[in-house]
Image (cartoon, grey):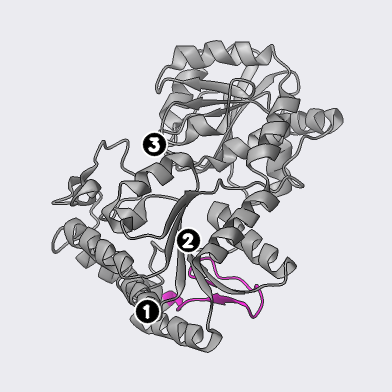
């Protein structure tokens, strides 16, 4: 089987790691694969190809900023990709995150429809079935069920200058996806899969199913007691309970405000460690330790394992991969009762809290601290979030389309 994957990034961040792991899995099982990506250029070999150039990306960004038509630029760069597809003749094209300034989504989808190429849409967020937003639950906006008319959120985010594009964007997606004869939609959680099933963009899809994001269980695993002690010593919190939060970037939506509130309620022998890019000008309480974002998976695994409790206070997640990584390292989690997050934990591996209930979070930190849940956490990660099983599920979707 010959597979093409297209994504914003390769090998880094959540979706880039997924793409690389599918690539490696396919090669290991005797298939062929080419990857196209558009951001954070690196040297990954002949079969991993960068789309466009810094200049074309900047021009695409300017066009998107003026018109609001995300993914309508990069015409010449996209035509080069399509020429490569003509030469490669893939059996399946697997589309991940395309919202960025590197590919013309309209040209790409028209090509896939005209050539009748089996196409997999991987839903890491909600962009593929809305008029332009990646998430909508905190905004309580569900216009995408019918039409994204006069989107007030794109206007607030200053995503356009000339005219509000949301209605036109959604109409284009409905038309373009409906034209692909062999379309599969793969959600990374049951929650986003249920949302996709309600979308008019996917009403003609042959397959709409859920495959959980996976964890490399050889990397994310419990460390020895000695390693955990050493990790805390390096952080300067040797004798304190470690409450860990991880995000690529911190914001109100990712729960930063609630972590600051939580810092007022935790005990003196507890400290919050937040890993990820912090907004400028944020003053954190003394009992919150901030570490920069990292793609070093070994370092992340040590942090997860050393933590006593993983706390995830994001308002909306299509999966919550950091929660699953923490479980794989034997650390129980506290999550909000929003979107996909309650799917990741169960009563044996964590607690689900009503959004914004800081007092209950503090209480359940004490409750979980009294339990030894490492074995249960690891077993749950192995059952649901193993890389081999879930990559096999992706391969099954490919075969169902062929």
SS at mark 2? loop
Q: Residues within 10 Å of mark 2 (few under 14, many from 20)?
A: many
**Predominant SS of the magenta segment:** loop
Q: Residue at x 26, y 61 (%)?
A: 174
Label 1, label 2: how far apart the Cα atoms are: 17 Å
Which region shows up in magenta?
34-54
Q: Residues within 10 Å of mark 1 (few under 14, many from 20)?
A: some
Above or below residue 83? Residue 62 is: above
Q: Which residue is mark 1?
A: 111
- In the rendered structure, the answer to whether residue 84 lies left or right of residue 316 reads right
Q: Which residue is mark 3?
A: 253
Give the foreground label among 1 and 2.
1
Q: Position of residue 231 (x, y in %)?
A: 76, 33
Q: Which residue is mark 2?
A: 96
SS at mark 3? loop
**In-front residue for pair 157/379:** 379
Give the foreground label among 2 and 3.
2
Q: Residue at x 54, y 10 (%)?
A: 363
Q: Position of residue 193 (x, y in %)?
A: 42, 46
Q: Earlier in the sequence, mark 1 or mark 2?
A: 2
Above or below residue 4? Residue 227 is: above
The answer to whether one can see residue 69 in this image is no
Within the magenta stretch, is there residue 101? Answer: no
Label 1, label 3: how far apart the Cα atoms are: 36 Å
């Amino acid at each position: 089987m010959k597979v093409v994957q297209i994504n914003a990034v390769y090998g880094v961040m959540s979706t880039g790691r997924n793409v690389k792991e599918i690539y490696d899995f396919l090669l290991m099982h005797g298939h062929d694969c080419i990857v196209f990506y558009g951001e954070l250029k690196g040297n990954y070999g002949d079969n991993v190809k960068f789309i466009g150039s810094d200049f074309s990306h900047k021009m695409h960004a300017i066009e998107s900023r003026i018109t609001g038509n995300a993914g309508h630029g990069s015409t010449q760069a996209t035509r080069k990709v399509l020429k490569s597809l003509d030469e490669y003749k893939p059996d399946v094209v697997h589309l991940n995150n395309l919202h960025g300034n590197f590919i013309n989504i309209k040209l790409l989808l028209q090509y896939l429809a005209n050539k009748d190429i089996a196409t997999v849409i991987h839903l890491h967020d909600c962009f593929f079935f809305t008029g332009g937003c990646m998430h909508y639950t905190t905004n309580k906006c569900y216009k995408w069920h019918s039409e994204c008319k006069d989107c007030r959120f794109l206007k607030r985010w200053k995503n356009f200058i000339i005219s509000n594009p949301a209605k036109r964007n959604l109409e284009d997606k409905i038309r373009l996806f409906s034209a692909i004869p062999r379309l599969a939609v793969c959600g990374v959680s049951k929650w986003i899969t249920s949302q996709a099933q309600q979308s008019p963009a996917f009403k003609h899809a042959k397959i709409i199913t859920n495959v959980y994001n996976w964890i490399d269980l050889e990397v994310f695993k419990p460390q020895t007691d000695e390693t955990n002690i050493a990790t805390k010593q390096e952080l300067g919190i040797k004798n304190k309970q470690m409450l860990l939060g991880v995000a690529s970037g911190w914001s109100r939506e990712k729960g930063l405000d609630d972590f600051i509130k939580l810092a007022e309620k935790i005990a003196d022998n507890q400290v919050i460690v937040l890993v990820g890019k912090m907004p400028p000008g944020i003053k954190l309480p003394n009992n919150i330790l901030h570490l920069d974002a990292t793609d070093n998976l070994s370092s992340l695994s040590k942090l997860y394992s050393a933590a006593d409790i993983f706390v995830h206070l994001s308002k909306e997640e299509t999966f919550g991969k950091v929660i699953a990584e923490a479980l794989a390292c034997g650390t129980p989690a506290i999550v909000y009762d929003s979107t996909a997050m309650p799917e990741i934990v169960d009563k044996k591996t964590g607690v689900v809290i009503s959004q914004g209930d800081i007092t209950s979070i503090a209480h359940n930190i004490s409750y979980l601290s009294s339990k030894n849940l490492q074995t249960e956490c690891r077993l749950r990660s192995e059952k649901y979030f193993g890389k081999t099983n879930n990559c096999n599920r992706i391969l099954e979707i490919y075969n169902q389309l062929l």
